[in-house]
Image: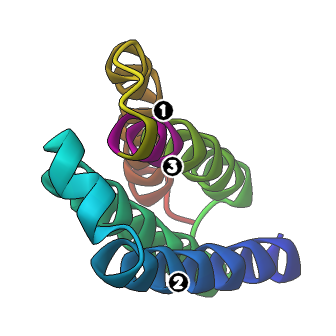
Amino acid sequence: MNKTFMLVAAGLGALGVGLGAFGAHGLAAVLEANGRADTFETATRYLMYHALALLILTGLETKLPVQWLRRAGYLFIAGVIIFSGSLYILAIFNVRFMGAVAPIGGTALIVGWICLGIAAWQKR
């Protein structure tokens, strides 16, 4: 779990920084034209939050039940891909139905946090 989640966290963190910079500089005109600069920023913020959360999970492996940490990690990964990914598509391409997809990812993120809470509740 440790190595995989750490590698994914590093990738998501790098992607978040890169997309944030690209959104601020390379896509600024497109995002303003679509009226979606805030949407893009929200996607980037949640991407970074959950990259950090995934990284923190790797440090909890010896302290909390691994099965719940693993569930939380996979839900964070799936959730941030669906949530942030749908918001990026909405912001850049103005594909409006992607706004309806984002709550699926958001739900996965919420359930991931609940799994982390269960892990804490069942502390070894």
Question: Does the CB distance between marks 2 and 3 fall below 8 Å?
Answer: no
Give the left or right position of residue 49, taking residue 68 as reference.
Answer: left
Quadrant for the N terminus in the image? bottom right
Residue 90 placement (x, y as % from top left): 38, 34
Give the main secondary structure, helix, strand or loop, of the magenta stretch.
helix
For the C terminus, the image quarter is: bottom right
Question: What is the three-letter code of the residue carrying label 3?
Answer: Val
Q: Nearer the viewer, mark 1 or mark 3?
A: 3
In the rendering, at what x and y percent does residue 25 appear? 34, 83
Residue depicted at 86% across the width and 82% down the height: 3
Question: From mark 2 to mark 1, how far is it between C-alphas?
Answer: 24 Å
Q: Determine crowd level at label 1: few under 14, some 14-19, many 20+ residues with C-alpha closer than 10 A.
A: many
Q: Compare marks 2 and 3 and give the one earlier in the sequence.
A: 2
Residue at horizontal 36 percent and vertical 65 percent from the top: 44
Q: Which residue is mark 2?
A: 18
- The front one of 87 and 53 is 87
Q: Which residue is mark 1?
A: 108
- Residue neighbourhood size for the residue with mark 3, other residues' Cα within 10 Å, grouped as few (<14), some (14–19), many (≥20): many
Q: Nearer the viewer, residue 9 or 37?
A: 37
- The residue singled out by tag 3 in the image is 80
Q: Are marks 1 and 3 in contact (CB under 8 Å)?
A: no
Mark in front: 2 vs 3? 2
How far from the left and from the top, in percent, is residue 91? 33, 43
Residue 88 part of the magenta segment: yes
State which region is magenta.
Answer: 84-91
- Label 2 to label 3, Cα distance in Å? 16 Å
